[in-house]
Amino acid sequence: MNIYQHFRSEEHDFIDQVLEWKEYVENSYSPKLTDFLDPREQQIVQTIIGTQSDVKVDFSGGLVSNERKRALIFPDYYTVEESDFQIQLFEVDYPAKFITIEHPQVLGSLMSLGLKRGKFGDILVKNERVQFLVGKEVSDYIQLQLTKIGRASVTLKEVPLTEGILVSDSWIELSATVSSLRLDAVISAIFNISRQKSQEYIKHGLVKVNWTTIENSGFICDVADILSVRGYGRAKLVSLEGKTKKDKWRIVAGKQK
């Protein structure tokens, strides 16, 4: 069976990477730790690895509710410890009385350090507290190099994962029937807007799938995709429940409050 037929063409390179990780574990009898993966990438890894009897996979983002997670692929006899995921939590110390730091500023400052997005986990902002998670392999470099976020001078403090901010993302689960899994049809159903309006939003670069701007209304959505429409918020495609007698898709989605 051709495994690629179940995935989008733009995901094939990542599938090749997952297959290489699997082969490494099979041949070396030792675990393989990945960078932080978004939910769709986690779904792909789970699909490819999850059916294997001799190779297993587990995920951790540092905190239970975190979205971005590292995968640990390991032989079936291996016992996984939380420390295997090598995740460091930083708290940002800054003059909170005089300045506000927001999520996009943190991400922009981290990306300016020249590291891949995969080295960073979730960014947690609640009231005046700001935290983010990184792979321990780059934590010393980040602590040394990250001295400003936006206009604020900052210092980073290592804190244990048990002190992570619990950011309560509330999702409303909904069911819908869509004529197809095209992006315009799916966001039209989830956000209760017209198909024409959803096409306009996509055309003007206001729609993202898995944090990437998509300008093709015919883009086909799949399970674990994170969708965002500017001005409407975020949603995630939780599951596909099959087709109706009229050949429409029944979907279950979560929409952020």
Image (spheres, grey):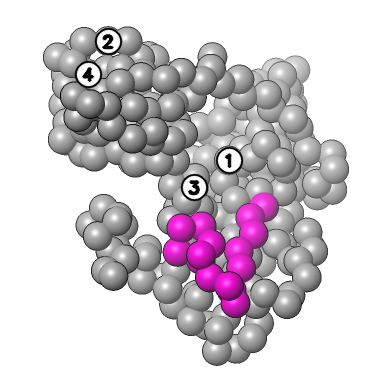
User: Is 255 drawn above or below residue 105 in the view shown?
Assistant: above
Distance Cα–Cα, label 1 vs label 4: 26 Å
Which of the two labelled residues, at mark 1 and mark 4, occupies the earlier sequence position?
1
CB under 8 Å between discs 3 and 4: no
Query: Residue most toward the top?
Result: 193
Q: Which residue is mark 4?
A: 198
Q: Which residue is mark 2?
A: 193
Q: Secondary structure at mark 1?
A: loop
Kindly identify which residue carries mark 1: 67
Q: Can residue 119 be spotted in the picture? A: no
Element type at mark 3: loop
- How many other residues sit within 10 Å of disc 2, few (<14), some (14-19) or many (≥20)? some
Q: Where's residue 145, x and y in %? A: 63, 55
Q: Quadrant of residue 44?
A: bottom left
Which residue is under mark 3?
38
Residue at image coords 72%, 48%:
62
Q: State the separation of the CA atoms marked 3 and 4.
A: 24 Å
Determine contact: label 2, label 4, CB under 8 Å.
yes
Q: Are marks 1 and 3 in contact (CB under 8 Å)?
A: yes
Instruction: Give the spatial CA distance, label 1 vs label 3.
Output: 7 Å
Please report whichever mark, 2 or 4, sits nearer to the chain's N-terminal start: 2
